[in-house]
Image: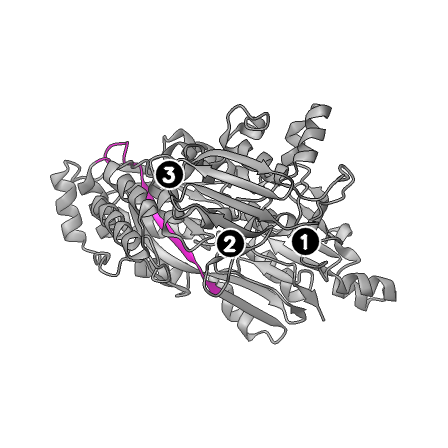
Amino acid sequence: MRLWLCYLLPAMLLAGCDSGTRQLARESLLYCVEGAPLTFNPQLVTSTVTLDATAHQLYDRLLDLDPNNQQPVPALAINWQRSEDGLRYRFTLRPGVSFHHTDWFSPGRPLTAEDVVFTFKRLTDPDHPYHPVSGGRYPFFDSIGWAELIREVRAFGDNEVEFILSRPDASFLANLATDYAVILSAEYGRQLLDQGSPQLLDQQPVGTGPFKLAQYRTDEFIRYHRHPEYWRGSARLNQLIFDITPKSSKRLAKLLTGECDVMAYPGASQLSVITRHSGLELAQATGMSVSVLALNTEKPPFNDIRVRKAIGLALSREDILHAVYFDIGSLAESLLPPVSWGYHPNLLAPLPDIDRARWLLEQAGVAEGFAMTLLVPAGASTFNPDGLKTGQLIQRQLSELGIRVRLLSLEEQVLRRDLREGGQDAVLTGWSADTPDPDHLLRNLLGCQAVATGTNTSRWCHPLFERQLEQALAAPSLAERIRHYHLAQELAYQDLPLIPLIHSLKLQAYRSQVKGLRLPPFGGVAFHQAYKE
């Protein structure tokens, strides 16, 4: 047991701590997570672990999504107007929003339009002094082409900011509500430039969110303190601690003993233990996520559609659903799940057919099979609770075709680097969208610009697919948007660069005395309303 946690643990309290320590324990929450954040700026990554640790704890966005109807609602912006041609959006900012006071920064003013301009020009303007900092990659925004979409971001006084677009984009407001669209402090950015250390903007964060960073011990824990001037009202928790515990079995053990109050990503095999335990609760939410087997369409033999279809016919997704997800989820007939308003109801995945799969390999000239390497992510994710076990099932299923699969398990940072380079044969991956807009998932998994960012891991770039996405964003009605998204899904279904596997549920386990937890269907975890009885 780590000494830094001892004074917080119920077991230690029972051993005889004073009343002040008991009060501190009641006002502190320990969240057991499977990995460490790659950065403290979610704009730089597509890592679910990083988003969970940062987006809703440290920051806010101009807009949020209503959990009931999934429509944009005010957050840092209290209202907005759209021009008739759809090319201009003007936002009025919430007055008096305070940035964090930390050991490394004391803000001299509240949030202004300058901060919004600073935040989004960093992402889109290659001449911005912060654009190349921390690598100069913004995977989500690069994948959806924001540098080409945003012509200008400009301030009108302190409280108004206007975005000028190069074309109408129906997903623009939804993208402003994503976990990636967090607002940074321009004042802090200037201070760091003057000090010659701009990289600290992403390592020693300053936001407007309900918590502020107090301490980070690499690969061990993150300690957040509440932001007492938070505009939504100060959090009831004094401390929020992310306890980094990679093994799911150890996270469950800590939850059972009270060393952790909340557990991220419980394994499907652990759910029966959790639900039978009188002191534990299980939260679940239906999100817009999908796990996929992505085949590199730039490399032989995967550049042959017959090989891709043969692999699809050899896979038993039901076996994966039973053995890996323990039936907590549903078979993925296509990329978008049924909860999406863009779901295509007429696309059905074929049933396993080994004989036809062998015939297709014969037609492709690889009747004897071949060797391939399948990259699998180490650890759990929102879309796949056990990548290695899923890979082992795929390995066994493809062996019936003479396809010899070597599994290579990689940590997320290494995996993302390899995927950007594009030399992989295949990868077990997926996507969890933090908005209900179909563009979010389809463009990041299959868009042409997402090839360079490493989220389009099949490296499939189809001009007709791209055209359907663009027409969907410019469509004048929801019905017209849906029609274009259906056509885009049909193209992906026919060409099969990705083999959809499972639509999963979001899961979170916690001790019964924890109240006010929110597990949104889209986006990460939020602790602003959480408290302990």
Q: Residue 8: give x, y in percent of width and height.
A: 77, 59
Q: Is residue 300 magenta?
A: yes
Choose between 522 and 378: the one closer to the eye: 522
Return the residue at label 2: 523
Choose between 440 and 267: the one closer to the eye: 440
- Identify the mark at residue 167; answer none if there is no mark: 3
| Observer able to see residue 433 | yes
Return the residue at label 1: 210
Q: Is residue 163 left or right of residue 369?
A: right
Q: Residue at x 84, y 62 (%)?
A: 21
Q: Residue 522: give x, y in percent of width and height.
A: 48, 56
Q: Is residue 369 left or right of residue 4?
A: left
Q: Residue at x 47, y 32 (%)?
A: 417
Mark 2 lies on a secondary structure that is: loop
Tell me the quarter of the picture where residue 103 sits.
Answer: top right
* Magenta highlight range: 285-303
CA separation in Å, label 1 and label 3: 35 Å
Mark 1 lies on a secondary structure that is: loop
